Amino acid sequence: MTTERMEAFSDGVIAIIITIMVLELKMPHGGELGALREVLPAFVAYAMSFVYLGIYWVNHHHMIRATEHVNGKVLWANLHLLFWLSIVPATTAWMGDHPTDTVPTAVYAASLLMPAIAYYILQSSIIKHEGPSSSLAEATGGNLKGKISPLLYLAAFGLAFVRPWMSDVLFIVVALIWLVPDPRIEARLAERGDAIAK
């Protein structure tokens, strides 16, 4: 089975998730500039989650472009990832309403940890299906970012019970780590494109 339908479906689901998330944003009650302060935490939480969803979308796109065929296990692993991403709007809204509270911050950290694990499972499923000499396997190599991120989310979960703002710092750190797509995958895609063109 080729990857086009899986990618199109995933793109649609992620677009819907982002739409749901923006619908959770509430307008301030007053009409003056100072009224924006009451919605600022919710907007910051939305912006952070938007960046995360964008990171998943970009990296998912690169991963699927480096994949030639999928099977049932890969499709289910992809649905597993999409399930956990679909939880993000709810946890974003809760943390946005209670930005300094322990439990919403911890739940938000968990809602970022689970897609990270699911992404790793999806990537591993593709590599297992296509073999160790596949484009994705050769491009990802040791996958250091994929191994560090869950550890930082676990740390953010724990720190939420100490100082929630420390968790917020780790959320930003992980986002910065992933903002630039993996250049190894882009290089492999470029090589494959050249080979196809020839």
Image: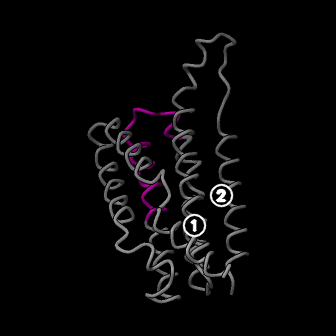
Give coordinates of residue 62: x percent, y percent.
Answer: 57, 66
**Quadrant in which residue 36 is drawn:** top right
Query: Dividing the image into 4 quarters, which one contains the C terminus?
Result: bottom right
User: Disc 2 designates what residue?
Assistant: 14
Left or right? Give the position of 109 relative to 3: left
Mark closer to the chain start, 2 or 1? 2
Q: Secondary structure at mark 1?
A: helix
* Front position in the image: 108 or 74: 74
Q: Which residues are magenta?
A: 94-116
Image vertical order of residue 142 relative to residue 48, above or below: below
Left or right? Give the position of 35 relative to 110: right
Q: Which residue is painted at 54% across and 26% down in the image?
A: 40
Q: CA distance from mark 2 to mark 1?
A: 15 Å
Label 2 is placed on what type of residue?
A: Ile
Give coordinates of residue 194: x percent, y percent.
Answer: 61, 76
Label 1 is placed on what type of residue?
A: His
User: Disc 1 designates what residue?
Assistant: 62
